[in-house]
Amino acid sequence: MHKTDRSEWAVLKEADLPLEVVILIIGGMAMLIVGVLLFPVSNGTLPYYENGFYGLLLIIFALQMITLGKTPVGDMTRSKPVLAAGVIIAAVGIVTCFIPISVYLPRVLLFLSFGPGGFLLLLQMCFAKDKLRCWSRYGGIFKHLILGCAVVYLLSMFIALLFWQRSLLTTPVSGVVVLIFGVAILYLAGVLRKIYRMYPEAATRPGGDVELSTEQAMLLLTGVFMLLLGVRLVPVGLGLIPFSGSAQLGLLMVIFSVQMLASGNTPIGPFPRSWLVVAFGLLFAALGIVSCLIPEILVPVLTILVGVLNIFGGIIALVKMRVSRPGHPVGAREPIPPVLARLSAVQLAMNLLSVMFGVSMLIPGMVPVPVIGVILAVNGCVLLYLLSILVELDKIRGTMGRVT
């Protein structure tokens, strides 16, 4: 009985998943799902949205650059140029998902990332002093790290050829290759998780002149996503350009999932990052990946889910703001620092916009599409402004810490 109780509560224990492992899990899941779906796609059972797959992979690369300083050609310090490159790649990925047009630029970027990028990473592993030679001496789990990295780098170079020459293999055979690649990525994620548990110092992020927390990096990505989505919806509502609503919802679900897996932040508020939250994050990721790849199949379900989550998330945050600011006796109110006043105003605006967006999702036609686009663009700007305030607060705390 005691063992049963322990197993029941195990899902509420804190999950030890470093951010690098989280991103690899999302990437591995994407490859596994694509590999499985390519079989029914090959015989015409399911449609396939190529732009969604390309855009999703670019966003995963951008996530690594923005949050970890990891680029397709190796680890770098988290500098402003690396951050800018990550944001640009994320923007290309977002636009690629949204608009079903030519995929030449995304294909070139993915070819360079997987092909020359994989080759350079393999060379670095073989010849860098702190990699292959050290790992070989350590033995144990590090032998699995050598195997995992080598297989992932070699397969990434082969995947690059498929991006460049799509007719190189038949669709079912390509599906098998992509499946194996997904398994290799998940294997590497598992090995890294074990290493980071044994040697926590190995998970230390590289230094640099950009100090964004995981939450702030995700806020940056979400702000860019909302801004680009809003800007695109205006001409879409006027019938000027095509648009993939399925990929839009899918990307939003993937962003939700990364936030949940990395820090326990959910659309309805922060929670302890337990294995239960991780399980829901993986479910969100799977739904989002499928929606990016297969047009329209999950749109009705995800429309309701995203709408409800935005409404409840906005309302809950508004209630928390009200509760955290109870009334004070006359004359007892203390002056509020300007930066905190701006933070409060931005949070209020963001929560109201979240509710408005959720309502527009649940009641189609109530708000014209161009107006929804304006709401989302404003939401994106508010999120980016919130990020600037949070960075300013971090600098103030740092200055106060040095003074004390």
Image: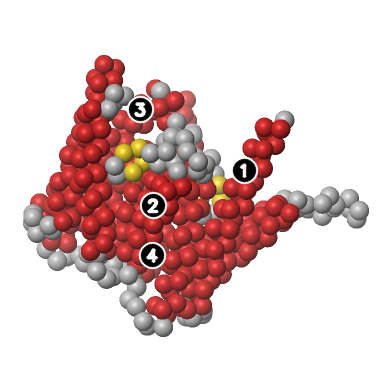
Q: Is residue 374 left or right of residue 59?
A: right
Q: Which residue carries the number 3 mark? A: 194
Q: Secondary structure at mark 3?
A: helix
Q: Nearer the viewer, mark 1 or mark 3?
A: 1
Q: Residues within 10 Å of mark 4 (few under 14, many from 20)?
A: many
Q: Secondary structure at mark 2?
A: helix
Q: Residues within 10 Å of mark 1 (few under 14, many from 20)?
A: some
The answer to which of marks 4 and 1 sits earlier in the sequence is 4
Q: Nearer the viewer, mark 2 or mark 1?
A: 2
Q: Residue placed at 34% from the left, 78% from the top?
A: 241
- Residue 258 position, x and y percent, is 42, 48
| Amino acid type for the residue under numbered disc 4 | Gln
Q: Quadrant of residue 89?
A: bottom left
Q: Which residue carries the number 4 mark? A: 248
Distance from Cα at disc 3 to Cα at disc 4: 34 Å
Q: Which residue carries the number 1 mark? A: 394
Q: Which residue carries the number 2 mark? A: 85
Q: Secondary structure at mark 1?
A: helix
Q: Which mark is residue 18?
A: none
- Residue 326 position, x and y percent, is 78, 53
| Amino acid type for the residue under numbered disc 2 | Ala
Q: Are marks 1 and 3 in contact (CB under 8 Å)?
A: no
Distance from Cα at disc 2 to Cα at disc 3: 30 Å
**How many numbered marks appear?**
4
Distance from Cα at disc 2 to Cα at disc 1: 23 Å
- Residue 94 position, x and y percent, is 37, 61
Q: Are marks 3 and 4 in contact (CB under 8 Å)?
A: no
